[in-house]
C-alpha cells in the first residue's frame, strides 16, 4: 500500500502540468520532473547535476547569479526567467520559489514550480505596443487638431475680423459727414452692432486658439481663460500663481493650458460649484497646477469610466509631456485636479 502511494506521488510529480525542480545551496539542480525535462528538451539525467543557470539565457543567468546569494532571506518569492531549450529556442517561465531551511535556519534547497508564460508575455508585449501606438496616434491627432484650430482662428481673424474693422472705420467716416440727427443715431447703433460682431469674432478666435499663447505667456492665457470663465459662469475664481516668469516651450504651455481649459469646462458642466481655487507653482523641479472646486465632487465611477472622454484627453495630454495627472474627490468636498509637469525635460 505504501509502495503504491509512493508510485502515485512520483507519477503526480513527473506528470504534473508545470515544471518542478530543486537546487542546492550552490545552485545545482538536484531533482526535476519529467515535465521540465520535456519543456527543456533534455532527459532528466542530463539536467540533474548541472547549475540552473546552464539552462538560462545570458540576461537571466546574470539576474540569477545576482539574486541567488540572497535567496535564503526569503521563504517564498516569485520571479521570471528565460530558459533555453536544447534546440536553442527560448521560453519564459514564471517561477514560484520556496526556500527550505533546517532547524537552524540554514539553507538546504529550493522547491520551485514553474509555468511557461511565453504566450502571455507575447500578448502583454503586443498590448503594450498597441497601447503605445494608440498614444502616439492620440498625440498626433491632438497636434493636427491644434494646427487646424490655429489655422481656423487665423482665417476668422483675417476673413471676418479685418473686414468688420474696415466696415466700422467706413461707417465712422460717413457718420462724421452727415448732419442728420436721426441718421447719426442709426449710424451709432450700426457701429455698436459691428463692435459687438468684432468682439464675438475675437472671442471665437481666442477660444479656438488663444493668441496669448503665441505672443505672451502661459500665465497670461490662464488669467484670460479665468476671466472668460467667471464672465460666462458667475463662478468666483481665486488664483495664486507663485512664479510668473516661467519660460516654457509653446508645446508645453499649450498642453498645460488645454488641460486647465478642460478642467474648467468640467467644473462648469458638472460640479455645481460656486468657487474655484487655482494654484500654479514650482516644486522639486516640476510645475504643479492645482484646480480645486467646492462642488458636488467627482465619483469614482466617473473617474474610471471609459466614456469620460474629457478626462481621457487630459490624461493623454499629460502623458505626451511626461507629466502626471490626478483627479479625485476632495475630502473637504468638491473635486481636485493635480497636474505635475517635470521641467528638465520640457523647458
Image (cartoon, helix red, strand yellow):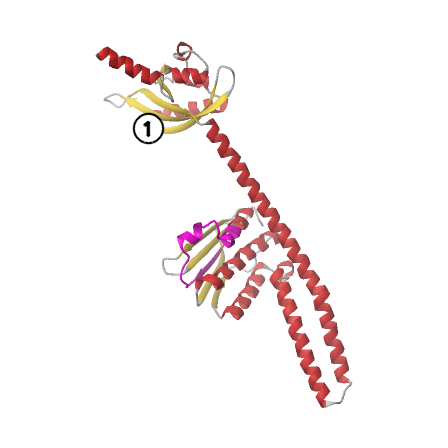
Classify 247 as above or below 66. below
Q: Residue at x 24, y 11 (%)?
A: 3
Residue at figure coordinates x 64%, y 63% from the top left: 205
What residue is drawn where x is 66% and y is 77%? 193
* Residue 136: quadrant of the picture: top right
Magenta region includes residue 302:
yes
Q: Is residue 297 above or below residue 186?
A: above
Res 51 seen here? no
- Tell how many labels: 1
Image x and y of residue 148, in percent: 66, 55
Determine if residue 298 is in view: yes
Q: Is residue 235 above or below residue 339?
A: below
Q: Position of residue 295 (x, y in %)?
A: 41, 63
Classify mark 1: residues with Cα within 10 Å, few (<14), some (14-19) or many (20+): some
At mark 1, the secondary structure is: strand
Residue that appears at 74% across and 89% down: 180
Q: Which residues are magenta?
A: 289-314
Q: Position of residue 341 (x, y in %)?
A: 52, 50
Q: Which residue is mark 1?
A: 76
Q: Is residue 79 magenta?
A: no
* The N terminus lies in quadrant: top left
Which of the pair 68/134 is nearer the observer? 134
Quadrant in the picture for residue 19: top left
Amino acid at each position: 500500500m505504501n509502495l503504491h502511494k509512493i508510485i502515485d506521488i512520483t507519477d503526480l510529480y513527473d506528470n504534473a502540468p508545470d515544471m518542478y525542480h530543486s537546487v542546492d545551496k550552490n545552485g545545482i539542480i538536484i531533482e526535476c520532473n519529467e515535465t521540465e525535462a520535456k519543456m527543456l528538451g533534455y532527459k532528466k539525467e542530463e539536467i540533474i547535476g548541472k547549475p540552473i543557470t546552464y539552462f538560462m539565457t545570458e540576461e537571466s543567468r546574470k539576474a540569477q547569479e545576482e539574486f541567488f546569494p540572497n535567496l535564503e532571506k526569503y521563504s517564498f518569492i516569485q520571479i521570471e526567467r528565460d530558459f533555453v531549450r536544447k534546440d536553442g529556442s527560448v521560453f519564459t517561465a514564471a517561477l514560484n520559489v520556496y526556500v527550505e531551511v533546517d532547524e537552524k535556519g540554514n539553507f538546504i534547497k529550493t522547491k520551485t514550480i514553474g509555468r511557461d508564460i511565453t504566450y502571455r508575455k507575447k500578448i502583454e508585449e503586443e498590448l503594450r505596443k498597441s497601447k503605445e501606438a494608440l498614444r502616439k496616434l492620440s498625440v498626433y491627432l491632438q497636434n493636427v487638431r491644434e494646427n487646424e484650430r490655429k489655422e481656423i482662428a487665423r482665417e476668422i481673424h483675417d476673413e471676418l475680423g479685418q473686414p468688420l474693422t474696415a466696415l466700422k472705420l467706413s461707417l465712422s467716416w460717413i457718420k462724421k459727414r452727415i448732419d442728420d440727427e436721426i441718421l447719426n443715431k442709426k449710424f451709432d447703433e450700426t457701429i455698436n452692432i459691428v463692435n459687438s460682431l468684432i468682439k464675438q469674432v475675437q472671442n471665437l478666435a481666442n477660444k479656438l486658439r488663444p493668441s496669448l499663447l503665441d505672443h505672451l505667456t502661459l500665465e497670461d492665457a490662464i488669467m484670460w481663460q479665468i476671466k472668460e470663465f467667471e464672465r460666462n459662469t458667475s463662478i468666483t475664481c481665486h488664483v495664486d500663481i507663485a512664479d510668473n516668469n516661467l519660460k516654457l516651450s509653446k508645446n508645453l504651455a499649450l498642453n498645460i493650458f488645454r488641460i486647465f481649459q478642460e478642467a474648467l469646462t468640467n467644473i462648469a458642466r458638472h460640479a455645481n460649484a460656486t468657487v474655484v481655487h487655482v494654484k500654479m507653482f514650482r516644486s522639486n523641479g516640476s510645475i504643479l497646477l492645482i484646480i480645486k472646486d467646492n462642488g458636488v465632487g467627482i465619483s469614482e465611477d466617473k473617474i474610471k469610466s471609459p466614456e469620460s472622454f474629457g478626462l481621457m484627453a487630459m490624461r493623454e495630454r499629460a502623458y505626451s509631456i511626461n507629466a502626471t495627472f490626478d483627479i479625485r474627490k476632495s475630502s473637504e468636498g468638491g473635486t481636485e485636479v493635480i497636474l505635475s509637469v517635470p521641467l528638465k525635460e520640457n523647458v
